[in-house]
Image (spheres, helix red, strand yellow):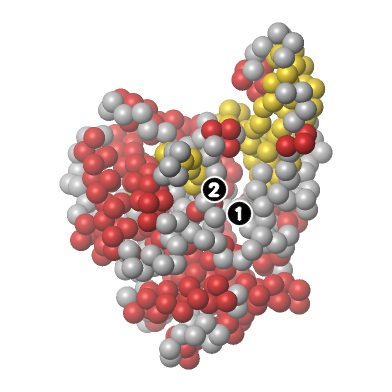
Amino acid sequence: MSDSKSEIVNPNEHLIIPDWITEKYFKEVLNKDEPDHVKVLKFTPVAAIPPGENFTSIMLRIHIDLEMKDGSIKPKTYIFKTVLASDRGGDEIDLYGLFPKEQIMYSKYLPAFEALYKEAGEDIQLAPQCLHTETREGNIHFIFEDLAVKKFKNVDRIKGLDLAQMKHALRKLAEFHAAGSVYQERNGPYSSEFDEGFVSTNAEKFLRDGFRIKERTFKKSMSTWGMPDAEKFIKNFPTEDQYLAQCMSTLDVDPEEFNTLTHGDFWSSNLMCNHLANGDVDQLILVDFQICKWGSPAIDLLFFITLSASNDIRLKEFDNFICIYWERLTECLKLLKYKKPLPELRELQSSLYKKNNSFYAFFALMNHLPLILFPSDKDNNLHSMLAETEEAENLRLRLTSNPLYGKVMKDLYPFYYNRGLFNFDDYSKN
């Protein structure tokens, strides 16, 4: 194949690609990954994903045509990940130290987790192979294998995951969690950056501003979802101080409970899977480890089920999802010779309703779900969501009054309210 250009698709023509991302930058990776290449014939960077699939970084797919020593031409693709421009949300993201955390995950912890399974006789891949990472002018960049080559792809975020896909994802999450707990048991606590996730003590102003900006349009849209007693839920909506108190409660970790290194941002676009000929899921893999946090598995379970299960099974199978996860978790903990008592299903279920975990249900509904259920749009980004302009306000109203979003929230918001997760008076100061 001498020309791959005709096959190149750019899913986000509006993405500005940094001009320093050239074939010269990939020289070291190509020398290691393709030692028999002679030269680069073509180098074409494009967006890797459509708008609305990732909000904290720039994701590129790099298409390269290589001339090999035998005279053949070999096409290669890589995934390149880098920071947002400072004026497009990068400054806010920098408050959280996401890229340094992900660099540690790929260089240290993820290889160690997979090694634990190999030591136990199982070959379990949790994440894509990271081929290169470096810090350039203060910014961290990653080059990954392109999982699309192995037919991996994302699930349709608007449609959500069906029962079979949810089962695969929950079992993979359990494998990740089991390794995270066993690693900590053997090697001691994780470094301090893993004490925080979506909530950071450095980002109080960002949390307050984000809530204040979104509160008005969110409450305005609540009456359009068709919820019985909508006024009751609107009246109960948290104050800014209650919301911040709920945020900060996530930093409390009960050492007597089963804890692990959570993914922290586990939803449909942060997993990829490939399929067998009959359409069944073959392999599933996790991506994007920027918000990992030491804490209860309830963090990931609440976030994932809220955001990723298809609407027809989210509530119907809610308790079953927890059981599916728990069964695989205990299997893996036994396999890896976890020494502490195994978590009980009743304990795991009750952890979902604790004050320090319920933030992840409310935050998912208010922050992520409106974007996930909205079709791809060039304005589907962090900068547009948080801007204090009339245009941004109209966008937020479009997101929260989207009929598809309203259809989900009509049942999901009361579901969590009735289980006590949205009792925001619990966070009021006495």
Q: Is there CB contact under 8 Å for labels 1 and 2?
A: yes
Local secondary structure at mark 1: loop
The answer to whether residue 54 shows anywhere in this view is yes
- Give the number of marks: 2
Distance between mark 1 and mark 2 Cα atoms: 9 Å
Q: Position of residue 215 (x, y in %)?
A: 58, 78
**According to the image, label 2 marks what residue?**
154
Task: In the displayed orientation, state which residue is furthest to the right.
Answer: 19
Instruction: Please tell me which residue is depicted at 54% across the width and 33% down the height of the picture.
Output: 150
Q: In this view, does 342 lie to the left or right of 389?
A: left
Q: Which residue is drawn at 48% across and 55% down?
A: 267
Graded by Cα atoms within 10 Å as few (under 14), some (14 to 19) or many (20 or more), the crowding at tag 1 reads some
In the displayed image of the protein, which residue is found farthest to the left?
341
Give residue 31's quadrant in the image: top right
Query: Residue at the location (45% across, 38% down)?
Result: 277
Q: Is the residue 169 above or below the residue 78 in the image?
A: below
Q: Which amino acid does label 1 sit on?
A: Glu
Whole-percent x and y of residue 422?
Answer: 40, 76
Left or right of 293 in this view: 158? right
For disc 1, the marked residue is: 53
Q: Could you tell me which quadrant the N terminus lies in?
A: top right
Left or right of 265, for residue 177: left
**Residue type, numbered disc 2:** Asn
Q: Residue at x 78, y 34 (%)?
A: 5
Q: Which of 79 and 278 is in front in this view?
A: 278
Sequence order check, earlier mark of 1 and 2: 1
Q: For the residue labelled by badge 2, is the local secondary structure a helix, a strand or a loop?
A: loop
